Amino acid sequence: MVNRPLADQEAERALLTSIFLNANYELLELVESRDFTDPLLAWLIGEWQLMVADGEPLGDAVAFSRWTRRGDVLRRLFDEALGMDRRDVIAAWAEISKEYAGSAHDAYYFRVLRNERCRRALALVLERAAEKDKDSPHDPAGTIDWCLDQLERLRHKLPRLEPQLVTGEEE
């Protein structure tokens, strides 16, 4: 069994940079903060969604810098982004966007992030199944039934990829 991390930090940064630099409004609507494991990146995507909903342009560094000066944004920044200062966030974003500026494959990185999110959810179900099995060592059939139920729920709950976004083809 290959033991891989359940997060791809480079894909997270590449997707975020690509969405911003390409001003990809369609993908911005599909991606969720929960797709990211890095709290700063999760905060950034959420803020861009709020910014766009408020009529501000996506992909404009000046508009984003101005947005981060708002009082409500500063409060969210402190509460949700690990208490970071506005200047630290702007500097971190500038560094990320500079490093990943050539990442133009937003649909690909979106698929990578969603797959990693699904893998994290599956790992959690399996971890809980192992705990359940420890608690009921004489009922393996019960544990299997519980797993099947949880996996079925997970299958219906997991986010779906938009086929035309990922492949570029219509259904």
Image (cartoon, helix red, strand yellow):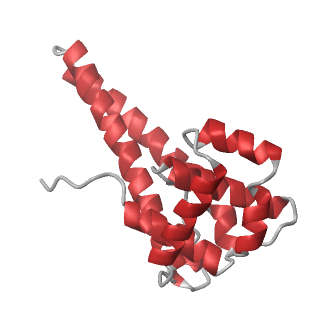
Asked whether residue 100 is in view, the answer is no
Task: Please indicate whether residue 85 sits to the left or right of residue 65 in the image.
Answer: left
- Answer with the quarter of the image where residue 72 lies: top right
- Residue at (39, 66) in percent of width and height: 10
Query: Where, quadrant-wise, is the C terminus in this rendering?
Result: bottom right
Q: Where is residue 92 in the image (x, y as percent from the top left)?
A: 53, 61
Q: In this view, does 69 lie above or below 149?
A: below
- Answer with the quarter of the image where residue 28 lies: bottom right
Q: Is residue 39 above or below residue 16?
A: above
In the image, farthest residue toward the right? 55
Q: Position of residue 49 (x, y in %)?
A: 73, 59
- Answer with the quarter of the image where residue 56 lies: bottom right
Task: Please indicate whether residue 150 sits to the left or right of residue 128 in the image.
Answer: right
Q: In this view, does 93 lie above or below 158?
A: below
Q: How many numbered dots are placed on residues in this image?
A: 0
Q: Position of residue 163 (x, y in %)?
A: 56, 74
Q: Which of 97 and 24 is in front in this view?
A: 97
- Residue at (56, 76) in percent of width and height: 18
Q: Position of residue 88 (x, y in %)?
A: 57, 54
Q: Which of 114 and 5 is in front in this view?
A: 5
Asked whether residue 64 is in view, the answer is yes
- Residue at (56, 69) in percent of width and height: 94
In the image, farthest residue toward the left? 1
- Residue at (24, 13) in percent of width and height: 135
